[in-house]
Amino acid sequence: MTDWRKQRTARDERIAAGRAHASGKVVRHEAVVELLEAVLRPGDRVCLEGDNQKQADCLARGLGACDPGKVHDLHMVQSGIVLPEHLDVFETGIARRLDYSYSGPQGARIAKMLYGGQIELGAVHTYLELFARYFIDLTPNVALIAGVSADRAGNLYTGPNTEDTPTVVEATAFKNGVVIAQVNQIVDTVPRVDIPGDRIDFVVEADKPFYVEPLFTRDPAAVTETQILMAMMAIKGIYAEYGIRRLNHGIGFGTAAIELLLPTFAEKLGLKGKIATNWALNPHPTLIPAIESGFVEQVHCFGSEVGMDRYIAARPDIFFTGADGSLRSNRAFCQTAGLYACDLFIGSTLQIDLQGHSSTVTTNRVAGFGGAPNMGSDPHGRRHPSDTWMKAGREAGGTGDPALRRGRKLVVQLVETFGDGLVPAFVEHLDALELAKKIGLELAPVMVYADDVTHIVTEEGIANLLLCRDADEREQAIRGVAGYTEVGRGRDRAKVEALRARGIVRRPEDLGIEPLDADRSLLAARSIKDLVHWSGGLYEPPARFRNW
Amino acid sequence: MESFTFRHTTQKPLAGTKAQAITGVVASGNLEVLLERVLPADQCTIEIATPVVGYGDVWEAVAADFVARTQPGGLRIAINDGGARPDTVSLRLAQGARLMEGGR
């Protein structure tokens, strides 16, 4: 007779073994290693929660301290490779295989380890893609997650950085997996229940609060005149023209400049209420002036940001908050919102080629994808119209009955022609191709594919790729905004002027923008301290951003 | 350290009567531009001193575009570069010309 409960039986055994090191569900942090050695089996698929912000660091240290004789050959399936411990386990043999999304801070080391064969790589995913696979073919056996507090029954309060937790727990707990949560504190009653206790098997009171990274704070003091000029062009040439109300921003200084120009430049253009009202965005401190000026109607967040808690709690009309008053974020839902319910994604990149493919990979770094490829892609599953989406669809052309022509999402690359150290952003060939060859990837890691990009904005102007009708026009439009890079200087001047006459390439003067007006006095806030003032003292910047 | 001098003929003199102006600072990624109205009305020279080696053709292109766009006849322009990017150079040159015209 077929045994239909093998996984359930294995789960019961793991939990029974773990209980020896627990009092009820509660485990002292000194017993983490014993707990993990009791629960884990060689070859297990394990999600060690590493988000953008919140890190299960106590459990990561515990996993790293396990005996590789007992715990080995794990298959790590987690969105973020953020902490050194996330890679240490591959050096000791505790882990062998990896499927992940984002490795920003560990990008250089992961490239080295992939090249050296220490990591057996499944694939680099987008967030949604990895989450999707949790439910199909990468379901974790054990999830090691992080929260702010829990009660003795395991009811979990994640705090404002809920992020990946509900998705990870859903996939693990309901498919015979074991969920272990580290919390900063065990309490009698949690402020709100983000994860019900019957999905949590063990709760570890961590030796210190989990690590949180302030990834989304951009100091207005570092915004340059070039970035201001580009932000003016984006607002006037794209936001205003397409009437963009629903959007997602990347995390660079260029988009921070746009946020800081909404209450000044955009307000003077009469755009309040007409653009940038509904957002899929982390709570960027640089959005505070636009919120306070009445530009913003609502913001749904992937995760939170350090220092924004009091401000968010005081603005429940803008943010999604729980009964306790604090932010409720959710990466899977917000990524879905960014994919299907936003009309524009705008972000930066490191390299763009002559077709418009872009990548943040350089030959020595594998930074991963995170969410940009989902937000920065045209979702073919979309069916609801909006004026913005329909206008972009018309510009993209096509034939046949208009009622059968889909719209287009606007995917805008906002790039300065030269990056740090005079490295050109426009290239003939992406470094990603060389890297793929070097470490044997079947697909080159492309952030945004050429057929999804609709506009490129540089300090030289805007290239509207929707209006290009063939590959040559597209290449010349890209060269036409590539400034003094080799790609830019390689342009056919006559062709670029012809594209300009058709509005495919637009210069600041074509948009009625005087480059000499691009001045820092246009920024609604010129320092972190200004942001604190705008927030009425509610924003509490982390120490490293306090310089007064 | 590298230095270049580019000499251009212009179709007209730069407007205004201001004899001299300076803009920008020599800081990392920035540059200082000194403009003096000392040349014949159809002449412009741009002298560049830069710590970044190997970008002569980019400087030449930036200078040529600036002259074509602004027609800065009569100006001798000296640039002290701190490793500025070409777009910053263009912006500072335009700001300098604006100062010499007597604007802002």
Image (spheres, rainbow, N blue to C red):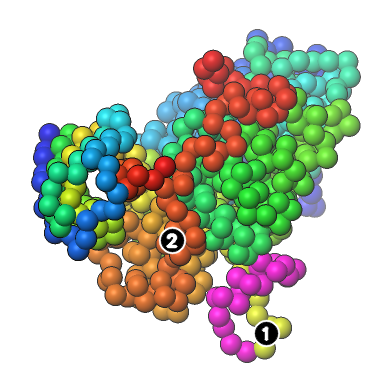
Task: Determine if the magenta segment contains residue A148.
Answer: no
Task: Determine if the magenta segment contains residue A381.
Answer: yes
10 Å neighbourhood of mark 2: few (<14), some, or many (≥20)?
Answer: few
Q: Nearer the viewer, residue A543 or A507?
A: A507
Q: Which residue position holds label 2?
A: A509
Tell how many labels: 2
Magenta residues span A379-400
Q: Which residue position holds label 1?
A: A402
With respect to residue A231, does A203 lie above or below? above
Residue A463: name its quadrant.
bottom left
Q: Position of residue A443 (x, y in %)?
A: 43, 58
Q: Residue at x 65, y 80 (%)?
A: A405
Q: Amino acid at mark 2?
A: Glu
- Dot 1 lies on which element? helix
With respect to residue B70, does A205 lie above or below? above
Q: Residue at x 63, y 29 (%)?
A: A531
- CA separation in Å, label 2 and label 1: 34 Å
Q: Nearer the viewer, residue A262 or A12?
A: A262
Q: Residue at x 73, y 25 (%)?
A: A536
- Dot 2 lies on which element? helix
Q: Position of residue A81 (x, y in %)?
A: 52, 35
Q: Quadrant of the C terminus of chain A?
A: top right
The residue positioned farthest toward the bottom in the image shown: A400
Q: Are marks 2 and 1 in contact (CB under 8 Å)?
A: no
Q: Are the residues under marks 2 and 1 on the same chain?
A: yes
